[in-house]
Image: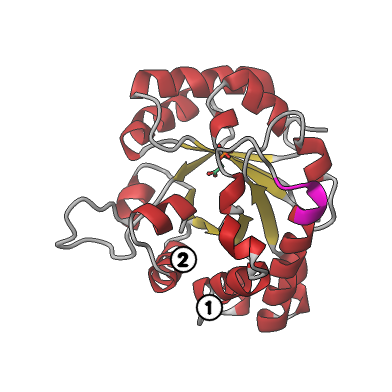
Amino acid sequence: MRKPIIAGNWKMNMLPGAAVDLVEGLWAQIAGFDAVEAVVCPPFVDIPAVGKALRDGSMSLGLGAQNMHWEESGAFTGEISPLMLLDLEVTHVIIGHSERRQLFGETDQGVNRKVKSALAHGLVPIMCCGESLKQRESGQTEDVVTNQVKCGLFELEPAQVSGVVVAYEPIWAIGTGKAATAGDADEVCGMVRRTVAGAFGADVGESLRVQYGGSVTPDNVSELMSMPNIDGALVGGASLKPDVFARIVRFT
Ligand code: PGA
């Protein structure tokens, strides 16, 4: 009922030529496999070339950005607007990744504005949440994640929330090779779902897609995906090699 969604977050990697090679190599291995919604999230400057490759090759992959501003235009030096993304046929946008929160000062309020703007423009927001190691070790995981989810979805209508993808990404698991166990990941993804159900209704909680992210590999993806509350993955490092990411997408 909830279609799995697996997205590759390329972060600040790949020049446009390499990005096109990557997406073509990926498609060669997953063409016709439609059990999973697969999405690639290249850096902004790669989006025109990757978008063209998707159109030219009739590749049914989602095209995601890694961030965006909430305004449509204006004096916001260095920012990219939802209209710019739509013009390039972008379909998804990662919002509030922990690297943006930690390194670029993104706040829950900013995340909320971006989520609202993405939805208003017909983009699927992949809204990230997740605790640090210190927060986990001091027993704050539930408070931190619940608060991020509530703040990020503040003032949305229930019908809108069904269109959001939440990515639970414990910060200590990102890029470390130390993924959360499937049980631990499922527990927090379930908490995210219950939080959303409590705020927006049981149906919305039931329809919400929740991804796990943090050191997902071809070796751990099946177990993660077998968990009842995990509907997908947000993949960093392992999404940069077409054969590796293809194995993740075809996890079954
Ligand atoms: P990783 O990154 O898969 O390299 O751990 C995940 C992410 O940051 O989305």
Q: Quadrant of residue 89?
A: top left
The residue drawn where x is 73% and y is 69% is: 191
- Type of residue at label 2? Val
The quarter of the rendered structure image containing the N terminus is bottom right
User: CB atoms at circles 2 and 1 under 8 Å apart?
Assistant: yes
Residue 100 placement (x, y as % from top left): 40, 54
Indicate the position of residue 79 as horizontal and vertical percent values. 25, 53
Mark 2 / mark 1, whichever is N-terminal: 2
| Residue in view at x 54 percent, y 70 percent | 148
Residue 149 location, x and y as percent? Answer: 58, 71
Q: Amino acid at mark 1?
A: Leu
Q: In the image, which disc is placed on residue 115?
A: 2
**Left-right relation of 227 to 21:** right
Residue at 71% x, 25% y is 247
Residue 233 sits above or below residue 83 on the image? above
Residue 245 versus residue 212 in the image, above or below:
above
The quarter of the picture showing ligand 1: top right
Magenta region: which residues? 180-184
Looking at the image, residue 96 lies above or below residue 53? below
Q: Secondary structure at mark 1?
A: loop
Task: Report the residue marked by disc 1.
Answer: 156
Disc 1 crowd rating (10 Å Cα; few below 14, some 14-19, many 20+) is some
User: What is the quadrant of residue 108 in the picture?
Assistant: bottom left
**Image height check: is 243 above or below 124?**
above
- Is residue 211 found inside the magenta-colored segment of the image? no
Q: Residues within 10 Å of mark 2 (few under 14, many from 20)?
A: many
Q: Secondary structure at mark 2?
A: helix
- Left or right, residue 51 beside residue 28: left
